[in-house]
Image: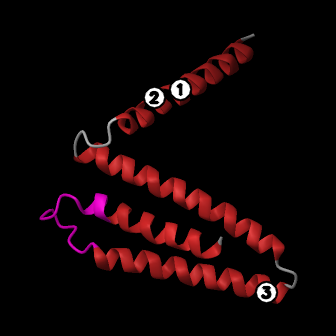
Amino acid sequence: MRRTTAIFFAILCISNNSVYSQDITEEPLKDCDKNQLTMTFCTRNAYDLSDSELNEIYKKQLASLKTLNEKQTFRNVQRAWIKERDKGCLNEVPVRDGSRTDWQLQYWKCMTTYTQLRVNHLE
């Protein structure tokens, strides 16, 4: 009986926590121009959506390739692109020492832009 109660309580806590977390994460998306925090949050969300789209396209393209060599080449090209994108955005948004408060916002804008360009290229 104690074990069943403990399991039920754990499930209840997890489900309530996920609903609560969802409310917290969706709230800033309602007003993206409210302040620096919400703008950054919305920009990061835009990146996450672009990245998910890219992952879906990548999986479809990879599955369509016939040979192991083609698949490995495609993987290597994508991995190289990811490294270049990440490096490029870190270079484009230089100062992170506190003298520039919008660096996260600019970084996620850069990541979103490059990721969306890659999506367009692979489609």
Question: In the image, residue 82 lies at what x, y percent?
Answer: 53, 76
Contact check, label 1 and label 2, Cβ < 8 Å: yes
Q: Is residue 59 left or right of residue 32?
A: right
Residue 30 occupies quadrant? top left
Among the two numbered marks 3 and 2 on one chain, the one whose residue lies closer to the N terminus: 2
Q: Is residue 54 magenta?
A: no
Residue marked by disc 2: 23
Q: Which residues are magenta?
A: 93-106
Q: Residues within 10 Å of mark 3 (few under 14, many from 20)?
A: few
Disc 3, SS: helix
Mark 2 residue type: Asp
Of the two numbered discs 1 and 3 in the rendering, the one whose residue sits closer to the viewer:
3
Mark 3 residue type: Glu
Mark 1 residue type: Val
Most frequent secondary structure within the magenta stretch: loop
Disc 1, SS: helix
Q: Quadrant of the N terminus?
A: top right
Q: Which residue is at 32% across, 42% downward?
A: 32
Asked if residue 95 is positioned above or below residue 39 in the image, the reply reads: below
Residue 64 occupies quadrant? bottom right
Report, in whole angstroms, how far the alpha carbon at label 1 lies from the one at label 3. Answer: 43 Å
Residue 70's disc is 3
Residue marked by disc 1: 19
Q: Quadrant of the C terminus?
A: bottom right
Q: Residues within 10 Å of mark 2 (few under 14, many from 20)?
A: few
Question: In the image, residue 96 lies at what x, y percent?
Answer: 22, 67
Question: In the image, residue 37 lies at what x, y percent?
Answer: 27, 45
Q: Which residue is at 15% across, 62% downward?
A: 98
Between 117 and 71, the residue placed more toward the observer is 117
Q: Which residue is at 44% across, 34% downward?
A: 26
* Chosen colour scheme: secondary structure
